[in-house]
Image: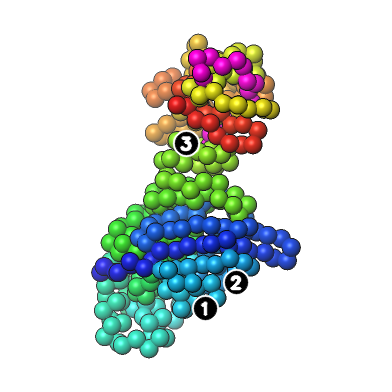
Amino acid sequence: MKMEHELGGIEWVDVSKRYGQNAVIPDFNLSIASGEFIALLGPSGCGKSTLLRMLAGLEPVSGGRIAIGGRDVTTLPPGQRGVAMVFQQYALYPHMTVRDNLAFGLRNIRMDEADIARRVTDAANMLELQALLERKPGQLSGGQRQRVAIGRAVVKEPLAFLFDEPLSNLDAALRTRTRLELARLHKRLGATMLIVTHDQVEAMTLASRIVVLNQGRIEQCAAPMELYERPATRFVAGFVGSPGMNFLPVVRAPDVDGRCAVTLADGATVRTAVPAFAAEGRLELGLRPDAITPAADGQLEGTVEVIERLGDRTLLHVQLRDGLLIVADAPPRAAEPAVGSTIRLRLDLRRAHLFDAAGTAHHPA
């Protein structure tokens, strides 16, 4: 089953959404190429679901224009937009079989029964639902119900698929398997797909580009690893990555060989790999946990508060002498420090970022 999606591009142009005087989406602009898989990522309340609902026609826009496949759909009803939406809640009809759930929307638009049967069969084969077609939703597991909900979108052969946190109700193991199924579905269909999620693993696994949102605005739009390795702002650096980046308050010291030097809270001055830049006010030194490791000659000293054992890695939550709590990586197969013990931590300054007072990131060269 391969669909034609040459016209599946999506565009928001100066789109805004207001509730009374409260602007939750101010002047949003984004273009998605046909066939892309895009994730809208951000914390609760950042506006990602509102953007998706405006795209689907479930929420009116307050200003601006939305186009799908080059066609202005800003004022069109949902059924005329050429999109199919999969919700967090499965929204299946409990009295209908899986087959009838898949076919229901097509029968509503008076599609020929032979075409309906073909589409249902193709979707069932793709999503491995063949053995479940005569069951009702109450006889299915959560993962099976979610596959049926996805199948109901697939049979419509839309220009674009919209997923609103579709995996949130699944347990961890099932979420992983369903992520892989969505990735395979995108590869098979070549369709434009847009997923709203607060789960960064979900976004980084599925999307070719991730749009990080904060209070209705785009903080950064980039490929997954670019977001991780070169976050544009302090917000992105703290939100993307599990756990997030550590931020250490520092004071600017005289540059050394064209690189920024900073003074740490304990008075030690270190040189970073960040090219010199003009900055006033406070700075923060940003380091991922794997760039901070225990070492006898480390630049920082602190007390081990918690040891987090994750199987493939061990994280040390360490309180520094100034009271700041940071997360460091314990070397694999090394002896763990005891909780409550004092250790020194080495900073890999080749991988350190600097964030200025406006939250703008400055990266190592």
Give the Cα separation between the discs numbered 3 and 2.
Answer: 35 Å
Contact check, label 2 and label 1, Cβ < 8 Å: no
Q: Which residue is mark 3?
A: 230
Give the Cα separation between the discs numbered 3 and 1.
Answer: 40 Å
- Give 346 or 281, whichever is nearer the viewer: 281
- Above or below, 14 relative to 277: below
Q: How many neighbours does mark 1 have within 10 angstroms: few (below 14), some (14-19), or many (20 or more)?
A: few
Q: How many numbered marks appear?
A: 3
Give the Cα separation between the discs numbered 2 and 1.
Answer: 10 Å
Q: Which residue is mark 1?
A: 77
- Per the rendered image, the range of residues in magenta is 244-259
Q: Which residue is at a point 58% across and 41% down the rendered structure image? A: 235
Q: Which residue is at a point 55% across and 76% down the rendered structure image? A: 75
One can see residue 14 in this view: yes
Q: Which residue is mark 2?
A: 60
Counting from the top left corner in percent of width and height, residue 249 is at 64, 26
